[in-house]
Image (cartoon, rainbow, N blue to C red):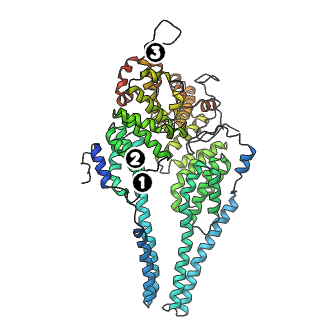
Amino acid sequence: VNEAMPPNEPDVQPGGPADGGGGPDHIDPKPDGRDAANKVAEAPALVFSPERFDREFLVDAVLRHGVVVVAVLAFMGLVVFDQAGTTAGLAVVMLLVIGWIAVSTISAGVWRALPGVTVLIGRDPGAAEAVLAGLMKRRPVMRWVRLMLYHRLAAIRHRQHRFAESAAICRAVLSRPLGPARRQRGSLLLMLAEASLQSRDPHGAYTALAELHGVPLGLAERLQRLTIQTRYEVLMGHDRAAMNGIRDKLLMAELMPAEHCGAMHAMLTASAKRTGKDELADWLWRRSELLCGREQLDRLVRGAFAIGVVGPPE
Amino acid sequence: MPAVPPKSFVPPSAEQFEAHLRSYPPSPPSKWQVRVPILVAALCLGMSLAISGPVSALLPWIGLGWLLGHNWVRAQRAVRLEARVRSSQEVAMFRRYPGALREAWRVLPQTVPMPALHSQTVAMIAHCLDSLGHYDAAIVGYDYLLRHLPPGDPITVHIGVSRANAVLGADRLSDADDSIRRLRGAVEPYRDTTISAAYRLAQLAQQVRTHHFAEGAVENDDLIEALRPLGVEAGYGHALMALCHYHQHGDGEDTDVPTPRDTARLWWERATLLLPEDTLTKRYPELVPLTEMT
């Protein structure tokens, strides 16, 4: 399988891309081979900038608080003009209730559309972005709903391998109080950790990984964290840390999709080799040969721990 | 009578599972049930128009509060249920099937108003039963899902392949033959996925169960690639291929050509690289003779 290099010597180079499993399960056969037509088709409908991000939250806040201010003023007016019990007063109250429901309906509508966007991200990120652009234009929406929209935008950028933008969006979202969107904290930190590794920012990856250890995660997210952390440790030469608890790590790796599992084995092969555990390295490499496809193995040999949607280094 | 699991839970039989499914079919809330909270809120609004005084100003807010509170309670209930189902799935992923099965069995009655979650739970129960070797009971679950899921959906195809594997496990060979043949076209669009890999495993298992070892042995060229999406579970396929070669007879004259025993040993080494021997022989007892080669 591995003609390019001896089985036990996968060349590890910092900056090689990896996917912690946050993305879908297919390998992009030519991630850099997107032709001009595709590039036009993939032209982003949404451009992220911190200024725009802040402005959108400000507009939402002004509109939402505006409704509250109108309500308070209306009540005060009713009391001052002694209209509280009259039909006109009741009409005002009902108008306020209807207005409040209308404002809430916008957020509810956007929130209900989010699962559809999530499904589309896996199938067609371009279409997902178009839908998301439409949802972003709706306002006012609650702060946490807007944060969820940006979370999906980060996922789209991650899927499109635009890691710098993905990291910037994750940082911007995490810098705000998440409220009911806090369930996405783990996902945001995972994307940030991986995007930081992709952007050759090990410090950012370390910070995100450290924070991830304080966040309750589901099994799928724990598996992703394990992959990203192992990749970080291997790339940074922390081989003892990578080899620590290897039995448990392998048990967890076996729960991952085959490509991710194979990449974990290949990464651990590098650490085992460097810590002088040749027999273990050989065993791990033979397993990774069975678990990874030829194309993926070739990339692994080149030091690109590429799994999921992520391709060779640019 | 619903099949209530006893305190010391044992995997249910096919009849118990069937009774459990009959007792708790999915039943989404009717249109009227959905509209009741809105009607109550509208009633409050109407009453506020009909009566006068300070209460009339409060009634619209009471209606609104009721509507929001009702929806919030419903959403919380759905979130809690989803978390329970997800938790049982995670337990199953760790191959702790009895625990996962117990939890999924208990949660099934509560998923009745949510058909998608109900199907997910039934699939979980069937998967656990399949993994525990209770194939007849697992087939009940798979059949139920195949009746209720849209045909052609990837999940339906996946369930169909799982059913074919379970039917083989239950030694219902003619049923398995039908299932595998019927699935051939449906699996075609899912190349290089777990669906096609599980289908290939089913084909191989069928060849072994029907003692067509020679047929199985000649189709080994692309087996590693075909089974790869299964991850470590591809080891089952490698072991079955080893068995196919094990039952071949080489002439032993040409020393440069590997004998069937050598080839069987190679495949068995691959299998045991991915899965322990006892795991392999537990699922396919016919593999026991191969353990001598280790």
**Is residue A5 rendered to the left or right of residue B160?**
right
Residue type at the position of mark 3: Pro
Write down the quadrant of residue A13 in the picture: top right
What residue is shown at x 44% (from left), y 67% (from top)?
A: B72
Q: Chain of mark 3?
A: B
Q: Earlier in the sequence, mark 1 or mark 3?
A: 1
What residue does disc 3 label? B260
Residue B123 is tagged as 2
Neighbor class of circle 1 (other Cα within 10 Å; few <14, some 14-19, many 20+) is: many
What residue does disc 1 label? B117
Name the residue nearer the viewer: A274 or B206. B206
What residue is shown at x 48% (from left), y 17% (from top)?
A: B263
Instruction: Tell me, yes or no, whether dots 2 and 1 are on the same chain.
Output: yes
| Label 1 residue SS | helix
Q: Chain of mark 1?
A: B
What residue is shown at x 57% (from left), y 27% (from top)?
A: A274
Residue type at the position of mark 1: Leu
Residue B107 is tagged as none
Residue A103 in view:
yes
Q: Chain of mark 2?
A: B
Q: Position of residue A258 (x, y in %)?
A: 52, 36
Residues at discs 2 and 1 in contact (Cβ within 8 Å): no
